[in-house]
Image (tube, coloured by chain):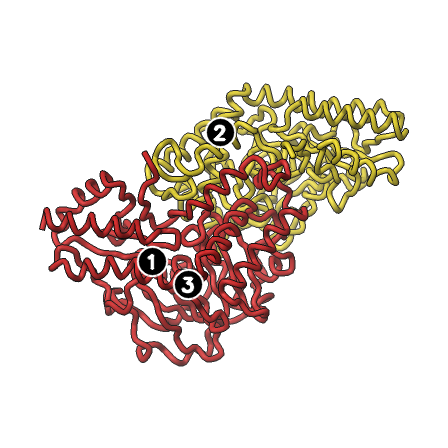
Chain colours: A yellow, B red
Amino acid sequence: MPRIYNFSAGPSVMPETVLEQARDEMLNWQGRGLSILEMPFTGDDFKSIMAEAEADLRDLLAIPDNYRVLFMHGGATAQLSLVPMNLLGGKKTAAYADLGYWSGRAIDEAKRYCDVTLAASGKSLAYTDIPPPDAWKTDLNDAAYCHITANETADGLEMNWQPETGNVPLVADMTSNFLTRPINVSEFGLIYAGAQKNIGPAGLCLVLIRDDLLGRATPLTPKVFQYGVQAENNSRYNTPLTYGIYLAGLVFRWLKDQGGMAAMERESRAKSGLLYELIDNSNGFYTCKIAPAARSRVNACFHLGDPALEPDFLDEARKNGLFHLSGHKRIGGLRASLYNAMPLESVEVLARFMDDFAQRRG
Amino acid sequence: MPRIYNFSAGPSVMPETVLEQARDEMLNWQGRGLSILEMPFTGDDFKSIMAEAEADLRDLLAIPDNYRVLFMHGGATAQLSLVPMNLLGGKKTAAYADLGYWSGRAIDEAKRYCDVTLAASGKSLAYTDIPPPDAWKTDLNDAAYCHITANETADGLEMNWQPETGNVPLVADMTSNFLTRPINVSEFGLIYAGAQKNIGPAGLCLVLIRDDLLGRATPLTPKVFQYGVQAENNSRYNTPLTYGIYLAGLVFRWLKDQGGMAAMERESRAKSGLLYELIDNSNGFYTCKIAPAARSRVNACFHLGDPALEPDFLDEARKNGLFHLSGHKRIGGLRASLYNAMPLESVEVLARFMDDFAQRRG
């Protein structure tokens, strides 16, 4: 089989040129006579790979000097605990916006460490929209931080603005929309993002943290998971995820070659716009429950008007090379994930298939 | 440059055939049209990769049915905290053997969670030998577990027997000698091993745990790091290190093809024996401080009788394609790591170089 159209929510499609370079360098990186997989992490070669990856990431997002970039093991799920452990700093409360499935997981985990104040909740909207700014709690004074899930991967919701949190540091889980548009990093105290969506390899989590928030870990936080300890050691307190960092570096360079964040924003709007327009113009053959302004650019979640057609839809899609279009198991329905490495041309193939399927079965 | 002789202590050399297969499958695994890096971890393909890796590991070590195999993120350093967090189970004391540098790191981290009783200490032996059985504390009744570092990677010491711990579960950090010889898993309550030595990819840690030790985590252990939670979820509570698990599976299959643990033990004895014999017969040109019975089969640590020759030794070694022979930065001297993927023929090249260097400079 040739390469499929892979709409998986993560791990997910990677740029083909990145995979080709990884393939070509597998046994002998840059003529050094060994694979990245075999390279000591304390040597100059690996340090330069890591430094270049960080420099390119800083370029891409214009990360200010007072922010540290940490390359952590694991994914976002680990950070659901590590954020409270690292940021509570003696406070007893944190604020969380409940915007969908992953917000809920973050809140459940945070409750094991502190009281959780809801900064906003999409529950009464059945998680089909982001609560408007005036529905957000403004008095967060006692909270150590305010946590948002910038894109709800399972629900297909995305936040396109930041809440006012005053002096309370804003923390964002950007796992699924990280590096898909320009952001103003200085609006956040901390941003974290598992890499297996827009960057590539599972097992790597990027943490961007304002330096005044380092060193607040509660006493029982394992040293290896303390942001301050990893910052002091340039993310080499323990053996880092060397191969994942190498691949991330290749993706960062690819992103720069593609035109950076402005290009990724344009592309993601074009890709998601194509699908949402088709859905809205399908006379109910396809439906999207999410309010237009809150629809995710990276996880287009939709249903068939007649859910009984779903198995046929997925089966015929696969026969056309279009894979991994099932929705999240807790949400159901269908989902097309449209991360950076998903070419517009592939989304056009999906759109043509959806259009054709609607014509034939509608 | 062709592939070097890579004596790195980790990440370290991998079997060339494994790297070749990983290279060939990089863009299209088994004709499925996508890379392992791009594969959803919830699908049947990845689940079968994971199941096969576990089955092969169980075969290799004859792991009894009442032991669970966990594929955790990170390396051994994370487990230095996660072992006490998961195993204390309300007890206030754990026993640790202080056998060298990594024992010390484990003890320092454990002291943040509990009182540490020294089950044995190599300090009075200047960490040149393992304390004999009669020097070990026998009364460990109050300890939640007894922790040993089965191979001291930095010092070059290896334990070749297990202490009597009665009802106190024995916990072993086997990071550097895991899968290098047959072991009787049932002598241990828990074994952990970072993968970047004898398995390959950094970022993966194997945990073998007797099932009665699951579910003892202290309340503030992040859920994702609870052995019980990961066991219930077949190590898929969060996105696992998919690519690392795939590579580990390839290495497990390679180990079976090589003849399994008996072959690895023979090989490791031949490889390390060659170097230690050369060192002992060098009339002091090379020295090894470690007592013969405690010398590591996988990390041969040695010094030059005249330390001033060390830079020349390393420089000439590199010119002969022999790389990463420096000792651990806290220990100094020289170290040749001889993990499973290091062929005997490569160690013979090193031995010839060492012999020649001694002839010319001795």
The quarter of the picture where residue A190 lies is top right
Specify the amino acid type for callout 3.
Lys
Specify the amino acid type for callout 2.
Leu
* Observer-nearest of A347 and A266: A347
Q: SS of the residue at dot 3?
A: loop
Label 2 belongs to which residue? A57
Which chain is home to disc 3?
A: B
* Observer-nearest of A234 and B179: B179
Q: CA distance from mark 1 to mark 3?
A: 29 Å
Q: SS of the residue at dot 2?
A: helix
* Observer-nearest of A115 and A109: A109
Specify the amino acid type for callout 1.
Val
Task: Name the residue rendered at 42%, 58% in the picture.
Answer: B175
**Is residue A259 among what the camera can see?**
yes
Q: CA distance from mark 3 to mark 2?
A: 37 Å
Which chain is home to disc 2?
A: A
Q: CA distance from mark 2 to mark 1?
A: 38 Å
In percent of width and height, residue B224 lies at 59, 53
Question: Pointers 3 and 2 in contact (CB under 8 A)?
Answer: no
Instruction: Say if B198 sits above or below A186 in the image.
Output: below
In the picture, the disc for residue A73 is none
In the picture, the disc for residue B111 is 3
Judged left or right of residue A251, residue A40 is: left
* Front position among marks 1 and 3: 1
In percent of width and height, residue A131 lies at 75, 34
Q: SS of the residue at dot 1?
A: loop
Q: Residues within 10 Å of mark 3 (few under 14, many from 20)?
A: some
Question: Pointers 1 and 3 in contact (CB under 8 A)?
Answer: no
